[in-house]
Image: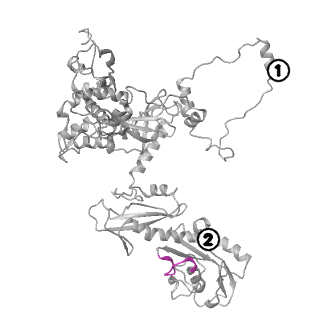
Amino acid sequence: TLRQKRSVLENRSQLVTTCEMGPQVFLNCAAFIKIDSSVFSDSASDYTEVLDGSRIHPEAYEWARKMAIDALEYDESAEDAPRESIEEILESPDKLKDLDLDAFAEELARQNLGKKETTLYDIRDELFGLYKERRKPYRSLTIEERFRLLTGETADTLQVGKLIMCTVSGIVRKKETTLYDIRDELFGLYKERRKPYRSLTIEERFRLLTGETADTLQVGKLIMCTVSGIVRKKQIGEVLENENAIMRSEQTNLYQCPFCMVDLFQDLSAVWNHLDDGSCPGQAIGIRTRLDNGITGFIGLKNLSDRPVRNPEERVKEGMSVHCRILRLNMDKFQLDLTSRSQDLADKEGKFSSPKDAFYDDEAAMKDSDQEKKLKQKPKRTYVKRVIAHPAFHNVSFEQAVQLLASMDLGECIIRPSSKGDDHLTITWKVDESLYQHIDVTELGKENAFSLGRTLRIGNEEYEDLDEIIARHIQPMASFARELFSYRYYRNADGGSKTTLDKLLQVEKKRAPSRIPYFFSASREFPGKFLISYMPRTKSRHELIGVTPEGYRFRGQVHPSLSALIQWFKEHFRDPPPAMMAPNRGATTGGNTSALYSTGYQSAGQPFSNTPIGGGWVDRPAFPQYLRH
């Protein structure tokens, strides 16, 4: 339009009056057009706006003038005060430092103009110098900075003397090259023998910086990545002019932003304020991810799920790990296009599978596929997913709980749904490496099938919540178990193997025939219980010890400490266990935690002449009052 009229743009307002721009387009682009007001100050008939030569948006001119008048302490009623204040404040901008911009921002917020703290501080910085470069001068990276960016290491993480693990990649050899160098030189004096320099290809640069290639990141490969953020597209002015784009939610009866999908607005004006003050982050178009090697990935909304997704924040959160397949690799931009749709991850049609070679056995593959289908058809335990907010709760099966506990410390636990129904929970706690006990929890007073019961019961004991169960039930048992593990006469014995324990007892018995050796070991057959194995004469005996929150349960009695258990055992080892109190002398039975575990128990009426003391067994009269450590 200006070219047709053979005119020039003297001020920003001509974008509306002459170029006929719409209000929203004008507000978006005006600040990017710099007008040198000094060129038109003499020729222009009207007042030349000094702020047209700044990065300040036209809608914020009044705030800039207000800041200049207050800083110079001018009378606002004076006719030329705004014009003179801007020109004078540009010559002495230090007076702006005395302004309380936070109070000014609060006043604007009270006038329903939105949060303007950042805008006011930007205006003040611009008045210190129009279009002044405020970024730090560019400088090249130092050797240390470049090394840290490419490797993630520093001189401290790779300090001299540090012990590290490395992989042998080859042998470095030194050739006797003097004679060969003389020969090569005689072929041509000062002849250039190096290969011509060439720039790295995109593939070579990508491999050097990431360690990956097109083969390691081939299309269709299943990878794990971490969500780093939501990719959004800022709203377009033409769309905002359509009021029909703003809808009201039928469920909450509140207005919803058509871009960020926030539905917390009471009326239309609140939605427009949300859009005008820049608080709307924009319309979500996908999610941004990252891999461990630093490569970034992008999952578009259409590839996020099989079902349509408008708000990705309902499906993923920042920091969440997601499974994806590679759709495209852009080595130049170090970026992957990914998909996390369920049908793409399953790939039942083989769209992402590698091409088959000439020797691929299709018949064997069909047999394997049929076997997998038969295994899937077998009935499995079903677990009802629960909605329980607790750090130890996971909606996982028994196998998944064991995998999670494998890397945890002894005594840690995972609370999970129970196959007994929605009124039960199962607590799996780690007794020892590869040894886990499962405790059934009954829920009472449930509001619905997914919520947690108001009262929790384990056996006859009731608890108010899961934290109380962990504090009063799991942790005390773990403490008693650790005490047994650290005892000097504890042996692993292949998970309480009777054969292994018999061999250990026989060795100790041969070493000191007059003593009666004993050992503790964890029972793999009965997780959460321990064995006490001893050999009074020629046959070994094995009895179970249960670990409870109150102490060690042995032969129907609970002992509050390990020393009390050992002392009681030394005084009563000759007594038959409760399960041994039978009419037939010498008969053995099992079935409870304190019953006899293997054969060889000496029946009542046949006292031993040896009494256990400490870690060994010494000849003493069979009277408890003479026992000592």
Local secondary structure at mark 2: loop
Determine which of the numbered discs, if any, sits on residue 490 in the image: 2
User: Where 242 falls versus 583 (above or below)?
Assistant: above
Q: Please, which colouring scheme is shown?
A: one colour
Badge 1 amino acid: Leu
In magenta segment, residue 557:
yes
Q: Which residues are magenta?
A: 550-563
Give the distance between the C-alpha atoms of the residues marked 2 and 1, in whole angstroms: 71 Å
Residue 455 % position (x, y): 32, 69
Local secondary structure at mark 1: helix
Residue under label 1, please give it.
Answer: 179
Instruction: Identify the residue shown where x is 80% and y is 13%.
Output: 186
Q: In this orientation, which residue lies closer to the viewer: 613 or 357?
A: 613
Residue 539 % position (x, y): 64, 78
- Identify the mark nearer the N-term, 2 or 1: 1
Determine which of the numbered discs, if any, sits on residue 560 in the image: none
